[in-house]
Image (spheres, rainbow, N blue to C red):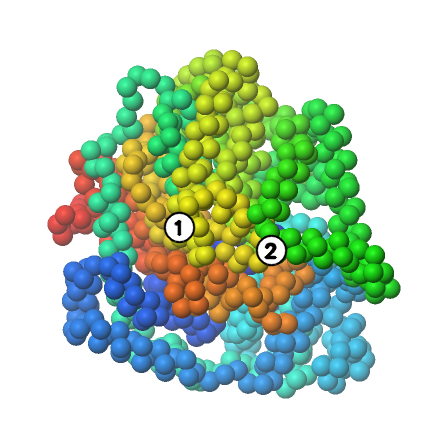
Amino acid sequence: MTLERTTLEDSIDRAAETVGSVWPLHSFVTANPLSGFEDRPFHRAVAEAEQLFGGRGYPHPSVFRQARADGRIDPDALREALDARGVSGEPETLLEEMAAAESDRESAPATDDATETVDRVLSKWLAAFLDQGQAEWAMPNRERGFYAAWRQLAPYDEAVPGCDDSSVLPESPVEAVEAVLSDHPEGRWEEIFEHHLAALPGWTGFVKQRADGDAGPWQSNYPVSLLDYLAVRLTLVDLLDAPVEPDDGAGLGETGHRGATDEPDEVPLAEVWLSAWERSYRSRLLDGIDRSVTEPSTGDGERPAAQLVFCIDTRSEVVRRHIEAAGPYETHGYAGFFGVPMRYEGYGSDVEIDACPPIVDPEHRVAERPEHDHEAATHDRWSGVATAARKHIKSLKTNAAAAFTFVEGGGSAYGAALVARTLLPSAVADLSDAVDARVPSPAEFCAPALDRRGDPDGDALPQGMTLAEKVSYAETAFDLMGWEEFARLVVFAGHTSETTNNPFGSSLDCGACAGNPGGPNARVLAAICNDDDVRAELRERGFDIPEDTVFLAGEHNTTTDEITLFDGRVPESHRADLERLRADLDEARAGAAAERAESLPGSDPADGVRETERRTTDWAETRPEWGLAGNASFVVGPRELTEGEDLDGRAFLHSYDWSTDSEGDALEAIVTGPLVVTQWINSQYYFATVDNAVYGSGSKVTQNPRGNVGVVQGNGGDLMTGLPLQSLYADSDRPHHQPLRLTAVIHAPVERVTDILARHEAVATLFDEGWISLTVVDPEQDNAAVHYQGDLEWERAEAATPLVH
């Protein structure tokens, strides 16, 4: 029996749907590890995922107990939720019963020895093949593909028995799969594929992501596919005499849920507690919304001193509050790639990056081009020296012959530097700032090359943009935010982070930019909006941008709350405005940094700026910042809804004015784009908190990087898929992140939201199946809050009266 390769690959692709994609660490993308289960109810999804991956789907009973003790779970909300499910008994008794069930779950049988050996051997070969420049000696024959390269080298691996010569192994991956599965019914192959793909979900997810679409030069030069992966794995299974087929539920309950007693369609008690916690949070969030706001105010006739547009990132909520308190400023929220789907090449960079969300395909190539030769020469000189020094030190440390000479000649100086970095991180931060001040940033002497150059060949992305495309990006931004007036200074502020010795550093950068800094996107949109031809066309479309409005870009360092302004094109006429803004941003930074420092273990909030700067250079610091820990809600509407409210850095805030969006197009773009991405982020944080060993990446202390693509725990094994323990927990037992599913609040007519959900079934499914809860504050009904009930039905928050849709 010989299957067509395409038929086999189609079957494998279907089997891989339950395994989420995993991005490399240098562009870490937060995503729902259970994305393949989003088409089914949440409780069923976590039960099936537990059977497949072995991971917990709900917070431990001790987490619920602590949330109740802290007052985060309202007693009335809990009692109402329990009564609705017909559950009697005292809350503490119920928690004890849940804890007993957890003990049963944790006593589930372990994996057999042969399968563990397969996992260990396969992980070793995957790490060697998928290496992206970390290894001093690269695996040979990688250009031939994973299976072919492994087949040639397998005879030299003592851990692979019965394989003294590569000729005993099938020549192609298709033949390898068929050789192992020939004695198994073809109707079960897809189930077998799913079982083996889920055995190492980290490596599988990375292969899946790399093989899917345009994954860049690594995939082009060293191709790998899920078929290759399964060919190697199944061959090892055969050689090591491990089970081929999954053990049909051994050690599992009737539902396939370890320790579960619930029927397949019965919502477990843990979800009742979770829902009560989420309702309690939603109630407090809605209490803080100003119900008198039906649309953005037109102000008192005076223009704001500046308008600043930040990413919708939850960390922006903190600094926005402090900026608004520092002076007459407006702040707005917009997805951090600023609506420009581009592949970006920074000045002096050897690689391009996709600076847009994973659900968006890049449409342009944009490169930085120097405009000032003197500053470029200074930058190149210092960068060249630093690069050469790093390469030289690395070669000395890794070269066996030179290592002893290096210790003899430079060991004392190198050791002194290590001591300073370890014991005096604040001094190192000062030195780093001094060096940065001497070396010009590319943002100071470069500009993005935006004008279209030539026509692309084949499927290549075009260089730059047409005038029509530039106008479209500016118009879309103003439409989504509902802008009708403009200040003298308008700042698009992307965001980045700053840490040392942190494999997960990119997870702290902009998720909307695929785990990269957002400054380049901000600079592109600012350049577009400053273009005279673009502004003339925008005026024709109803956007009356005053002649004295200047757009500039900035970048918010989320670790220190410093906001850098890229102001090279601000005219002298606006210098006073700019200096006033700088001073107020410094004031806002001090307040925001102090607020952040209060929540970081071991911090001194008395000097938040100094403390956050220390954390950027302390290579022993496992918590440089909290990232998006705490995220719980997504609020879509004018800033006036929440202005002045302390949302504790837990809300994604997207600006939107329903009154300027008569057709609902802008809201549709938000619901089908940023809302989906925030659900990915929220789910990543949720699952990595409730079961860090399976859906996270464990403690940073015991992590080891692999191939510049990810980390493993200890000296090998599966590639870890999520956030480390220190990004989520204040200590080993107490989570800092409150594991709640996303609460969405939209300020718009309920009919408009209903129409959007009716047209987008995949998005509606996220609400229908309990992955996100949705509340609409309807300005056409006196800002009444109505909760989504599923199947396009709504219920008023104040009374259980269904609304007609």
Name the residue: 31% across, 43% down.
646
Name the residue: 66% across, 79% down.
236
Say whether disc 2 or disc 1 marks the residue closer to the N-terminus.
2
Give how far across and how far down residue 685 sits, in percent.
43, 58
Looking at the picture, does residue 470 appear above or below residue 206? above
Give how far across and how far down residue 647 sits, in percent.
32, 45
Name the residue: 18% across, 48% down.
797
Q: Secondary structure at mark 1?
A: helix
Residue that numbered label 2 is attached to: 423
Q: Secondary structure at mark 2?
A: helix
Give how far across and how far down residue 310 sits, in percent.
45, 36
Question: Mark number for residue 638?
Answer: none
381 left or right of 488 in image: right
> Could you tell me how far apart the alpha carbons at marks 2 and 1 are, in whole angstroms?
22 Å
Residue that numbered label 1 is attached to: 598
Of badges 2 and 1, the one in the foreground is 2
How many discs mark residues in the rendered view? 2
Name the residue: 25% across, 64% down.
69
**Dot 2 amino acid type:** Leu
400 left or right of 32 in image: right
Give how far across and how far down residue 771 sits, in percent.
35, 57
The answer to whether one can see residue 323 in this image is yes
441 left or right of 149 in image: left
| Front-most of residues 195 and 173 | 195
Looking at the picture, does residue 223 appear above or below residue 118? above
The quarter of the rendered structure image containing the C terminus is top left
Quadrant of the image occupied by residue 572: top right
User: Dot 1: within a 10 Å radius of its alpha carbon, few (fewer than 14), some, or many (20 or more) residues?
Assistant: some
Looking at the picture, does residue 503 appear above or below residue 57? above
**Dot 1 amino acid type:** Glu
| Front-most of residues 726 and 584 | 584
